[in-house]
Image (cartoon, rainbow, N blue to C red):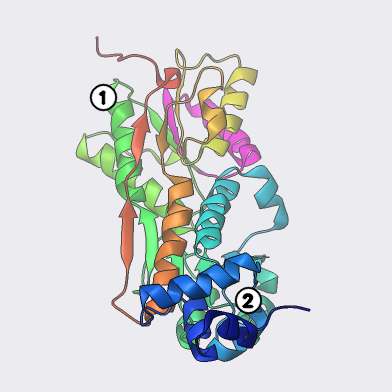
Amino acid sequence: MPLTLEDIARLSGVSRSTVSRVINADVNVSDETRRKVLEVINYYNFQPNLAARGLATGRTNVIGVVIPAGVSVIFTDPYFPQLLQGISSVCNTRNYSVMLWLAEPEYERRMITRILHNGLVDGVVVAKILINDPIIQSLIDSKMPFILIGRHPTVDVNYLDVDNFQAGRKATMHLVRLGYRRIATITGSQDQVVGYDRYQGYLKALQDTGHPIKPELVVEGDFTEEGGYTAMQRLLKYKPDAVFVASDMMAYGAMRALREARLRIPEDVAVMGFDDIPASAKTDPPLTTVRQPVYQMGSKAVDVLIDIIEAGPAAIRKVLMDTELVVRASCGASKME
């Protein structure tokens, strides 16, 4: 027969309420009392009834993770598995479970209703930000704790991000310093903040260095390998000597298009990516890229969210993490020498 709180209280020589406070990590319990209760709990391998605890505390100890995209994204883009690993690691450490929602736009309204009105989660991580995403306003209206991975351009909410504008500028400046003159870009989707910010960084680098901005050297991609391949095919007739690609996945597609066109990388066209996913060190040639700490972004975001859940409302949290330029062979040596 399972051990009850009353059994632990009797065996520990304390009250049932004291046992409950120990289980819930209440700080107002003496070290000696906590030690006695935990000895009994460990000896009998007692497992708290989480459903009953949820009824008592009003919490589920579940974090919702929303990725406004189709299921295929999880299996084709290494960014999201790394992000989810970071989220899961902290949830495991802090005794929370993860509930994942993948929702394409036509299903978003139904998904939002489930999250906000069924009491399924204590808080939400939104792992992909669309500029006009209805999820954000619904979460604000609900008063549920949440954090975005990626800044929102117009709403003042909790978020964690890298500075995609400066990172895009840094990547493009690297190509400028190497002496490239016809620098193209394959942008990310412009309805996503991350795609917009990286593109604006590219434009700023060209403006700051007196390089003309040529509309024909700008093609919008969709963060997929196939999108990068198609975009690079469109750029070929304009003869760029370098291309800044807003994600490594798109860069792989761009490199495939260049090889099919019998163009050498970097001798004919240099390629710069963004993300530094593991395969980027093994492409031919290895891909120069901007590293963002994806695993750490997931773990830090959910750590901040759980702090908000457990401590109550506080000032808006905005966390920016560093990026790093990773120089490999795909951009070549300086053409200025």
Horizontal arrangement in the rendering, residue 103 relative to residue 189 (left or right): right
Q: Quadrant of residue 135?
A: bottom right
Question: How far across and down, in percent of the image, does residue 319 sit?
Answer: 32, 60
Label 1: how many Cα within 10 Å (few below 14, some 14–19, many 20+): few
Residue visible at 62% across and 79% down in the picture: 115
Residue at the far top in the pictured view: 337
Nearer the observer, 38 or 13: 13
47 w.r.t. 116: above or below: above
Query: Is residue 284 in view from this perspective?
Result: yes
Residue at the far right in the pictured view: 1
The answer to whether residue 235 is magenta is yes
Residue visible at 28% across and 33% down in the picture: 173
Tell me which amino acid carries mark 1: Arg
Q: Quadrant of residue 60?
A: bottom right
Residue visible at 47% across and 35% down in the picture: 276
Mark closer to the chain start, 1 or 2: 2
The residue tagged with tag 2: helix, strand or loop? loop
Tell me which amino acid carries mark 2: Pro
Question: What number is the disc on residue 2?
Answer: none
Nearer the observer, 158 or 171: 158
Which residue carries the number 2 mark?
A: 48
Which residue carries the number 1 mark?
A: 177
Label 2: how many Cα within 10 Å (few below 14, some 14–19, many 20+): some
Q: What is the span of residues highlighted in magenta in the rendered image?
A: 220-245
Query: Is residue 124 in view from this perspective?
Result: no
Nearer the observer, 299 or 96: 96
Horizontal arrangement in the rendering, residue 186 relative to residue 231 (left or right): left
Cα–Cα span, label 1 and label 2: 60 Å
Question: How far across and down, in percent of the image, does residue 105 sit?
Answer: 65, 68
Instruction: Tell me the quadrant of the picture where the N terminus can be found.
Output: bottom right
